[in-house]
Image (cartoon, rainbow, N blue to C red):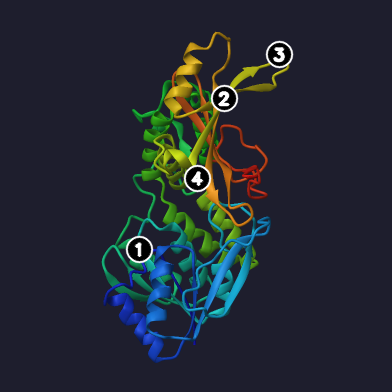
Amino acid sequence: MKIYCNGSQMVCNKRNLITEQLNNFIRLNAKLVISDHNYGDHELQQFLDDSAYKNVTVAFTRAMSEFEEWPHENIGKWPFREFLRRDYEHSIDLTLVSTMADECDEAFFAWTESDIEVLLGILCFLSNDKICTIYDADYEKIIKISSLDDFSHYLSGKIKLDNNGTIISSENTIRIKNLLLHEELPDEIRIIISSERDGIIHKSELKKTICKSKVSISKKRELIAKLAAEENLYSELIGLVRGWKCATEKKENLYMLLMEAWEHSFWNANNDLHIAQSWINQSHGCEDDIALYLYERFYLDNGKVNDIPVGMYSDIGEAMYYLQCSPFDSDGGKLEVWEKREGIIPSFHYEHRITFYLNHKDVYGFEFMRAADLINDCDPFEPVTYRSKNRNYMNNRD
């Protein structure tokens, strides 16, 4: 029996339901496939190594465009397999788990309600009619799910799966009259959407409108959090699997649908905003590990943008003060955040991680550098493509 084991909640440093389940697999001499993606994978590897269990394979993933071999964790020095992910086209990639859903007999997931990546893995296995043993970290219990209907029934006891009471329909459209009732809706966005003739707006269009507006990030966070609470993403994802099974389309089509549904969700936008806020607070690294570069932005008569480099700043507040005192008639600017990363050759480099867009009063937009091409100016929620990992490195030549 071949079993895929995964989940950030895979706590194995003490005797519990998870280790009991793993010991059952060991007694069956099951072939276990594990990864090195998160801390749960680390604890799982440590437990299996401490148990001297040898029937293990470690699965690694890397992007096709990564030109250096980054170190992977393989505590037990087990056999390993490497999978090439679809570069950085989506923030969650299902290359590994979808392959495991084809090859493995069943799966063991440690899952919490907020972990969408594990949820997508569960749906991949259930779409293949494979059994999933799930440790529900929210309720601290083990469940065994053998079908999509079983999982839907179980979820209905945890969360609301129908669309009653939400403003987002099953077709992912929003009635504007309902949206206008939200106190968090800024006037700039309220004016734009009020002009929609059909009285509805698609979710993707609303997200574009929100993130391209000059409203501050703090205001955007309030609105996106509200919309994420109104979004029934679980129902949407399960509906995609049901529709795919009825249509009997290729499996690759389902995996793409699942990844795109997450990528374009308000849940994902809410996560992005939280991460962006942590960069603003510089809590993603110490000061020595982060460099900030300010460009002052000017719009030319032909409509093009000219970003003039200003210099390096210690924090966003200092950069904002420069823009406020600037003698030039600019339209704000952009602030690039570069983070010091360990490498092999050279020993370290700085990698461009995120760009913030500023007016003279506030931070209003951001863009994660998931791609080398700046194709989504001020639009972090609606990626056109993430063709390749950003290679704009400043290498240490010493």
The residue positioned 46% from the left and 38% from the top of the image is 174
**Which is nearer the eye, 349 or 282?**
349
- Foreground: disc 3 or disc 1: 3
Mark closest to the chain's N terminus, 4 or 3: 4
Would you name the residue on which mark 3 appears?
A: 301
Residue type beneath disc 3: Asp
Report helix, strand or loop for mark 4.
Answer: loop
Residue 172's tag is 4
Query: In x, y percent, where is residue 50?
Result: 37, 81
The span from disc 3 to disc 2 (Cα, nearest Å) is 25 Å
The span from disc 1 to disc 4 (Cα, nearest Å) is 21 Å
Query: In x, y percent, where is residue 32?
Result: 48, 81
For label 1, count other residues whose C-alpha is less than 10 Å away and answer few (under 14), some (14-19) or many (20+).
Answer: some
Mark closest to the chain's N terminus, 3 or 2: 3
Would you name the residue on which mark 2 appears?
A: 311
Farthest residue toward the bottom? 28
Residue type beneath disc 4: Asn
Query: In x, y percent, where is residue 66?
Result: 65, 56
Farthest residue toward the right? 302
Residue type beneath disc 1: Leu
The residue positioned 56% from the left and 63% from the top of the image is 94
Asked whether residue 199 is in view, the answer is no
**Which is nearer the eye, 128 or 41?**
41
The span from disc 1 to disc 2 (Cα, nearest Å) is 52 Å
308 lies left or right of 146: right
The span from disc 3 to disc 1 (Cα, nearest Å) is 55 Å
Would you name the residue on which mark 1 appears?
A: 155
Report helix, strand or loop for mark 2.
Answer: strand
